[in-house]
Image (tube, rainbow, N blue to C red):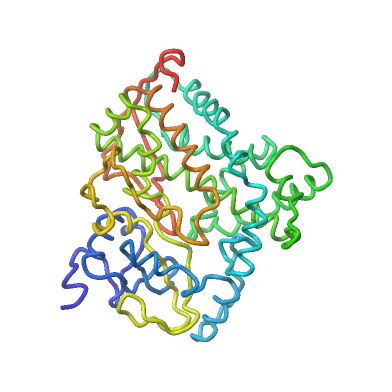
Amino acid sequence: MSLQERCPHQELRDGLVVIDAAFKADAPARYARLRELGPIHPAQFHLGLKGWVVVGYHRPRGAQPPRPAQGRRHAAEALAAAGYVLNKPSVGLGAQMMEADPPEHTRLRRLASAAFTPRRTAELAPRIEQIAHDLIDVLPAAGEVDLVKAFNAPLPATVIAELLGIPEEHHLGCRRWSAQALRVASHEHRAALTGLHGLLADLVATKRRSPQDDLLSALVAVRDEEDGRLSEEELVGTALMLVVAGHESTVNLLGTAVLDLLQYPDQLRLLRERPELMPDAVKECLRYDTSVERSTSRYAAEDIELGGASVPRGSMVVVALGAAGHDATQTEDADPAVLDVTRPNARHLAFGHGIHYCLGAPLARLEATIALRVLIARVPELELAVPADSLEWIGSGIIRRVLSFPVRYRTTGRAGGAA
């Protein structure tokens, strides 16, 4: 029986799972059907790119590097061996660890980690809470608003901009560029990356001349006896990665988390009554509907067998991070299809795995924990202003994001609802 016959609701062309806007809008259900059919499937992605998508939990963990490889050099070699011709260079996130394999990745991560410390992240908690309250304070006491524009997007954008030391006059531009940078099938994608790169290159030069108490200055200054310093290109690439990944992933996490809680009112009510559950609730939201739907692209550095499929050298392979959290083999305590904020061990791959585990994961969890706690306390009445199935989702790329989130709400005064 063909995949089309076994999975009649799946949109297919030429035997491929087509991961387009329609797929992404219904991604959890689509991945659930695919997971029942097998651990790996041939797929077509944005811009017509073809490859393989890996689903499940244990299988994605095994699909991480070193094979397939994801570094730029490995990818170019593998694609050339497979007969691909690249007519023009791609625009990416620059020289940074997401697009590197060891030993280059090891060096970049060690140097970035030396500046992006747990202590620096923890010290941001009071400021994150202040930003969350400020955003709610400027809202009318009741009404209707797009939660993405009013809360979900400006909070993490302000946090990452202040952390890096980006001047306030550039905050709005950075937010717009960051939102466009991951919409890889859009016309704005290349222009957004170019704009961000130029701004950050200028800031790196400024911080080198006049360092301040911010992360970008720390990245400029960090030095390791074994690994030396970050080059100019590596500094800009790392900063660009932090802006885009640090902003977008949290915007999306807040959006999917609030949407999921509105669809599970008993869980939302429980968090209002027991706000101390919020750290575990954030982990559960990451498992249930992750903001980063799939991994960055990897390319088979040689012919490999993966999940029973023969993957030729040069093939693109992506890991469905969002699907992994619904694999019944890794949730022993409750039904993985149900949101349960009391789940004691919400295992997920939302931040990746292994050497490419997200450097900013602690910051994303901290932001989401504080932001959701403040929102729930300060906005006791919150509901969708449109049917959930009419929401528009981003149609391409690795992230899962609702583009607009109209809600009706009523706020409380700060004194009566402090988190």
Residue depicted at x 50% and y 24%: 133
Where is residue 328? Give x, y as percent: 24, 57
Q: Is residue 278 above or below residue 103?
A: above
Compared to 212, does 357 lie above or below?
A: below
Q: Is residue 255 above or below residue 10?
A: above
Residue 2 location in percent, x, y? 19, 77
Asked where in the image residue 125 lies, by quadrant, the reply is top right
Residue at far front of view: 225
Side (left or right) of 362 relative to 27: right
At x 73%, y 57%, the residue is 224
Place residue 51 in its image quadrant: bottom left
Task: Tell me where residue 28 appears, x and y as whole percent.
Answer: 29, 54
* Quadrant of image for the C terminus: top left
Quarter of the image for the N terminus: give it: bottom left
Q: How many marks?
A: 0
Residue 349 in the image, given as x and y percentages of width and height? 40, 55
Q: Residue sitting at 59 percent across and 54 percent down? A: 241
Which residue: 56% across, 77% down?
74
